[in-house]
Amino acid sequence: MISNNTIISQLRSLYRNNATLSMLIVIFIFLTFLFSIFLPGKIFSVANFQSMAYQLPELSILAIAMMITMLSGGINLSIIATANASGIITATILTKLITADSGNSFYILVAAVLAGWVAAFLIGAINGFIIAYIGVSPILATLGMMTLLQGLNILYTKGYVISGFPPEILFIGNGTILGIPFPLIIFLTIAFIIAILLDKTPFGVSNYLIGSNETASYLSGINVKRVLIWTYAISGLLCGVASTIMISHFNSARAGYGASYLLVTILAAVLGGVNPYGGLGKVSGLVVALFILQIASSGLNLLGVSTHFTKALWGIILIFVIGLRNIKFKNNIKN
Amino acid sequence: MTIKDLSKKYEFYLFIIIISLCILFSFFTKEFLTLENFLDLLTNYSFLGIMSAGMLIVLISGGIDLSFTAIATISEYMIALIIINYNGNLLTAFIVSCLIGIILGCFNAFIIYYFKAPSLIVTIATLNIFYGFIILVTKGRWIYNFPTWFREMRNIFEFTAGNGKEYEIALPILLLLFVFIITYILLNYTFLGRKIIAFGGNQEAARRMGFNIFHITIFVYAFMGFLAGVGAISHVLIVQTVQANAIVGRELEVIAAVVLGGASLAGGKGTILGTILGVTLIAIMWNGLVLMGISSYWQPVILGLIIILSVISSAYSSRKSILGGTKIDIK
Amino acid sequence: MNKTENKILDLKNISKHYGGVQALKQVDFSLNSGEIHCLVGENGTGKSTLIKIISGVEQPESGAIIFINGKQELRLNPIKSIQKGIQVIYQDLSLFPNLTVAENITIHNYSKGNLKKVNWETTKKLSIDILSKIKLNLDPNRLVSSLSIANRQLVAICRAIATNAKLIIMDEPTSSLARHEIDALFSIIKELQKTGITILFVSHKLNEIMEISERVTILRDGVKVGLFDRKDIDDKKLAYLMTGKKFSQEKLAEKVKKEKILLEVKNLSKKSNYKDISFKLYEGEILGIIGMTGSGRTELAFSLFGINPPDSGDIIIEQKKVSFKSNKEAVEAGIGYVPEDRIGQGLIMDQSITNNITVTVLKKLLNRLKMIDNKKQKKITTHWVNSLVVRTSNISNLVKTLSGGNQQKIVLAKWLATTPKILILDSPTVGIDVAAKHGCYEIMRELSKRKIGIILISDEVPEVLYNCHRFLLMRKGRIVKEFQPDEISENELGNKIIEV
């Protein structure tokens, strides 16, 4: 092979090595271009950017929660329910304990948020336990957990909204640091941490290996049960973090927030290169896929398209992405 | 079959649990063990039962279908359209409802077959596509102005029992019976049904035997769609309204009933008898709670608990060791 | 051979390539009606491709001529092939575990329609009929999942007979069978021949080929290199033609200094697995455990590896008693295990060579920040790929792109990376060509020189006889006898294994 150090050839080899990522970046640029023609001025307005930058993180952290379980060969259908449960717990503590004394309010705030996170983590761990130690399929386990949590959420809130938070909490979901929305900072930090976790720690690499072949991983000395419990527990914890941003953003907690997010997280994962059967996928791909979906969603919204149509569109895109990938995969095998 | 043979069958245990629950509940409330309650139960759970029969076939074939609630919802709006706007009769509505179900089911099948995509993800996607579409078109409108004759079609059979009370058997119950019978015949007496079971047991072998996998796939999901159409008629007859969000979101109840009845998500396993028992168990559970006065807020919680406990126990009992469990006859 | 005999199959000029690889090159192949013919060749020589072409699953390139029973076939497909009476029994048998024996035997009936009614009486009667033809005593109502592999094989044969097959092709049928089951299979094959059925036997096991076939076709690298009557060939000539190389087998010359005991097993027992197992493994020794499938070998190996805890007895490693609660502890104690099922259990096919080799030592590759040091990872991987001579263009390639022999080297590498004291190899050369086999044996001898203790579990007599310092005969869960290689011959050992 002739060594050719021009920028073009370097870009080319970068493209070949990160085909998915490159393709996604191309789509992103294309979409941005497209929308800037049809919605001149609007899509690139500061206001729009701001609204996207606030919406994106909630969904994205949930998408990461979905992704890590898919990588291990499973799936977490209970992410929304877990997030809502966590949000409700945080909200309850905030509203019940903070009215009395405004001196301690910061500590109570922290305690409330942490309580929500701990609950979410434990829920995830229970999922992981049922899946890893008892051997229930992830679909059934997380579907059952989703139903149980939805029931508990509604049972507790009776459908009402919990509100009346101290103003300090609003910063999490609405504040900015150096002009960058705080939630976006949280999201990018988490994305970075998880990317490192998946790529550079034994836990992360084991997660991929288990997703590709659980038995061989087990026989190679990987503690499969422990890795799976941690995967689902971390997934749960991420749902907790997402819920904190959500309740801060809406300044209230409810049993039914984010119900439409489930499909989008699966779509984002698959679009971002995650193999639904496990073993393959990167955070970078997921992030770009999420940007694409956010731009598409904002654009459609600005064009006046109803959210139901958008949801249907996500379904169509999901099917196409999987189909194209499978067809391309088959062609690769033939060669 | 001897008692020993019986005790090896999963269905036997289900039966015992059901009987025990019946006894338990009849202590708590005397309304439980009445014919009226029984008929009520059958009527209210006919939709669940019809959907479960369809889901059984899908699970046996090794797939899963989460879009049937949206298909049924679309069918329900079509029924309303035919009966209210076009003054059609029940038969026409029935045919249209089933046809819509078949077409949408075929849509699922085409994608699953040609894109070689996991049925879970495809049907989650089509659930949203179908539901998004129907909301877009109907704006989620609630329809309740069915003609009087439609209300009267609900009960097909009335009789007066020995004790002077009047009982009615609803048409949905007959539909339920019809569905269970044809599914039973399909699974146990037709070549296609046996091929579906074989396919669920070993997909690659089915291909090598020359089975037409396309036909099998189309039938499985189209049948589910067809039953969604039947279920739609059943449901509308009972509640006499059409609501966009009445059924969607309750997919798990159906899956739980079928899995409880012994079917496996991996495919190749499951019987009609088991499904009937699974539906019965859930129905009785629910009914007992309602009659005992437990608030409806607790119901989803308890359903979730039942599902989790039952899948745990079924997974626990069928755990396989890495060695495959062969026994050596040591001399 | 009588040239005017009826040829049931006559193929000329068969070529096929996949991507850049030429699987078959202008192969001529024919079968005489009613013969038992063996198609021989190493893995990757095109045997399975030829079978797929005969069964209609694959199409040959243009220029190919196919005659079945004297009639030319232009576009063969699986259904046509079955109609012509060709039945393939694949290595994985392709049975339906969730259906009964009777239904599996009569399964081809179902291809005739969809809405036809199943007649259970007829199904049962037909299956009993066929079972009796090969004198097989099985309950037709049993689920296939409850049968042993040998019985499943026989059910697969019944299925072939049920379709009035004229040609039955068996792809590596003996790989999971014990000696007496192989004998039963061969006698059934001879019975089938008497009814006029032609049998094509695909194999790479030299001794079995010699035992059963009347004629032998040899493929090497996609080309036909020979067609012989059995009496005109012996196993040395076969091996030479199959590989193009001469391989000599010599018993290990060096004796092992029995100084240090690496592993001692005392009265190890586990219900329904094995009983009263006792032996010692010395540093630098290759200890063989030879026995048929079902003798408890793998169960014992798993117990040593920490997965199948024994009920009673002691496992002592370097004078310290151990009681493993998990295989992680076994690995930490310096034990590595190469499983029988390379593809399903030994390797993670869709992951890179790097990941497959370093999976066992992930925790040792951490830098100061507790993260995996990619440089270290690459270094270890490259070291082992080079020292075991794995042929690949890039260590990031997925393991599934490697040949069988190279794949096995990756499995070895991943355990060698843990600097083990003891290596347990469970049937390590199954499905690997002769050249790679001998490469594996060389690696084993190298390792023993480096004082690693090796337990070689196998059911192949030459493998154990020529590569072990001493070996144990295992039968029905017990160790029956210990042998030194120079005190027994190949034939004698072969007989001892079959003894009941």
Image: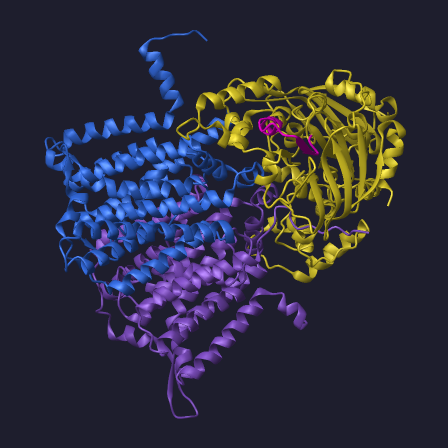
Q: Is residue C421 magenta?
A: yes
Which residue is outermost to the front?
A: C319
Residue C3 position, x and y percent, is: 83, 24
Q: Residue A41 or A119: which is nearer the viewer?
A: A119
Q: How many marks?
A: 0
Residue B151, quarter of the rendered image? bottom left
Q: Colour of chain B?
A: purple
Figure check: A263 above or below C174: below
Task: Please tell me which residue is depicted at 46% across the width and 44% down the height of the picture.
Answer: A228
Q: Which color was chain A given?
A: blue
Q: Position of residue A246 (x, y in %)?
A: 22, 48
C322, B74: nearer the viewer: C322
Residue C252 in sight = yes
Chain represented in yellow: C
Could you tell me residue B228's position as x and y percent? 38, 59
Q: Foreground residue, A203 or C5? A: A203
